[in-house]
Amino acid sequence: MADTIFAKILAGEIPADFVHQDELCVAFQDIAPQAPVHILVIPRKPLTSLHVAAQEDGELLGHMLRICSKVAGSAGLAEDGYRVVTNIGEDGGQAVEHLHFHVLGGRSLTWPPG
Ligand code: AMP
């Protein structure tokens, strides 16, 4: 596991604007928001991406998705909707090799993505 920027955030070595923290995952504001609401949900467990998650990680993944909906609701996105995205690998546009779900909303999001 590379010593990623998210590992440093989890270790408290660099700051983040947290909106949720529990024993399994944390959520914080994206530093370069692509929408009025852009929150990242990441596991404490150092998984590089969704692709390497195993069956035993199912409970963690389910929990993280529940936290995505929770932080989206807290950000006022429940009524108008929002998007949850995870990028995987080079073609997926993944820049940070630590699993993360993007929670995006606050504007009408286009489809398909670029
Ligand atoms: P991805 O391209 O899917 O790997 O997404 C990585 C995300 O991490 C991007 O949206 C970045 O803006 C975000 N990011 C990078 N560094 C930080 C940081 N220090 N704090 C918060 N978000 C960050």
Image (spheres, rainbow, N blue to C red):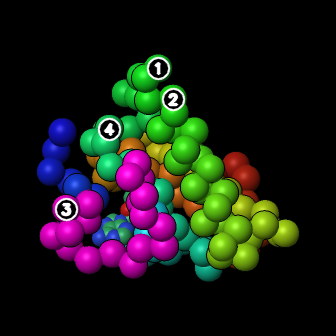
Q: Secondary structure at mark 3?
A: loop
Label 2, label 1: how far apart the Cα atoms are: 5 Å
Residue 98 at x, y percent in the picture:
32, 47
Q: Say which residue label 1 marks.
A: 55
- Rendered-image quarter of ligand 1: bottom left
| 64 relative to 89, above or below | below
Q: Secondary structure at mark 4?
A: loop
> First in sequence: mark 4 or mark 2?
4
Q: Say which residue label 2 marks.
A: 58
Of marks 4 and 1, the one in the foreground: 1
Q: Is residue 16 magenta?
A: yes
Residue 53: quadrant of the picture: top left
> For this view, does 5 lie left or right of residue 33?
left
Disc 2 Cβ-to-ligand 1 distance below 8 Å: no
Question: Label 2 is placed on what type of residue?
Answer: Gly
Residue 11 has which mark? 3
- In this view, the residue farthest toward the right is 79
Q: Quadrant of the N terminus?
A: top left
Circles 4 and 2: CB atoms closer than 8 Å: no
> First in sequence: mark 3 or mark 4?
3
Residue 101 at x, y percent in the picture:
50, 52
> For this view, does 54 lie left or right of residue 47?
right
Q: Nearer the viewer, residue 99 or 65?
A: 65
Of marks 4 and 2, the one in the foreground: 2
Q: Say which residue label 4 marks.
A: 47
Circles 4 and 1: CB atoms closer than 8 Å: no
Of marks 3 and 4, the one in the foreground: 3
> First in sequence: mark 3 or mark 2?
3
